[in-house]
Amino acid sequence: MAGEALLFPGQGSHADGMDAPHRGSPLFERGLELLGFDPFEDLAAGTRTQQPALFLCSVAAWDEAGRPDAAAAAGHSLGEYAALVAAGALQFDDAVRLVDARAAAMDRAARRTPGGMVAMLGGDQGAVLALAARLDLVVANDNAPGQLVLSGPLGAVDEAAALARDETDTRARVLDVGGAFHSVLMRPAAADLDAALAETPVAPPRFPVYSNGSAAPFVDVRRELAENLLRPVRWRETLLALRAAGVERFVELGPGAVLTGLVKRTLRVVPA
């Protein structure tokens, strides 16, 4: 493999007004029609609206860029769905319904068992992992060198944030998310998503799409998408795997530039 990889952001990259460049485009308007509501009217509602909104913007950006092919693609958590559309593994209409079901399932699971996430920036990774184990937290995201995100019950998340500086020499930032994503607290959501996936056609991708759970190309899209709700996002490893496979350029499609920053931090290169 050589050439370019398409990258699609996940929840957290949303911003007010991100829909403005795409309003009126046929694909974007089709997505709103399929949803049956406008998620951009209430992004403050959290997971339930942010996920479909971000998905629509990411796929619209890809569509408006001329639907480029690539050597590979990857998406950060929710971004996997846009990456699979870009590769032709999921049809757009099916993916809209699937993302809507995923958002609803994760929102229900979070309301049933409240949890949270905390970013641990810099410091001693071994100490961060030891603190996580002591507090019964799990690594939800391995985003880049010196950037781990922990996930679990709210009390433990708050305690990790309070102890971070003294015990791990990290800067802690509690994330504004609706639940303990990529942890066992999402098990009900994974079951609901699995049911939705069973009804969703999946085609062979035109190019490899890297899975968050394995940091390798998807093998069983339905199974892995459901399992990835419970497994960590291995983004640092995914970028390293793409580089090892010969990818030389990384293009982020969607709101913000979070993934562009993670590419620079992990690979010390400037994305295309």
Image (tube, rainbow, N blue to C red):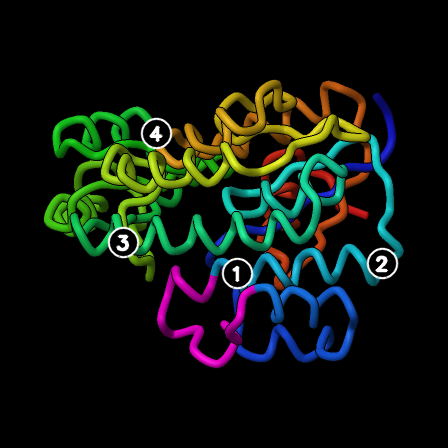
Q: Residue at 69% of width from left, 67% of height from top?
A: 30
Q: Which residue matches tag 4? A: 125
Amino acid identity at mark 3: Arg
Other residues around mark 1 within 10 Å, as few (<14) / some (14–19) / many (≥20): many
Residue 252 % position (x, y)? 71, 51
Amino acid identity at mark 4: Gln
Q: Secondary structure at mark 3?
A: helix
CA separation in Å, label 4 and label 3 = 32 Å
CA separation in Å, label 1 and label 4 = 33 Å
In the drawing, does residue 270 fall left or right of residue 170? right
Segment colored magenta: 35-50
Q: Would residue 241 be counted in the magenta stretch?
A: no
Q: Secondary structure at mark 4?
A: helix
CA separation in Å, label 2 and label 3 = 35 Å
Residue 215's quadrant in the figure?
top right
Position of residue 270 relative to residue 46, above or below, is above
Q: Which mark is residue 65?
A: 2
CA separation in Å, label 1 and label 3 = 15 Å
Q: Secondary structure at mark 1?
A: helix
The label nearer to you, 1 versus 4, is: 1
Q: Which residue matches tag 3? A: 108
Residue 71 % position (x, y)? 82, 31
Position of residue 146 relative to residue 45, above or below, is above
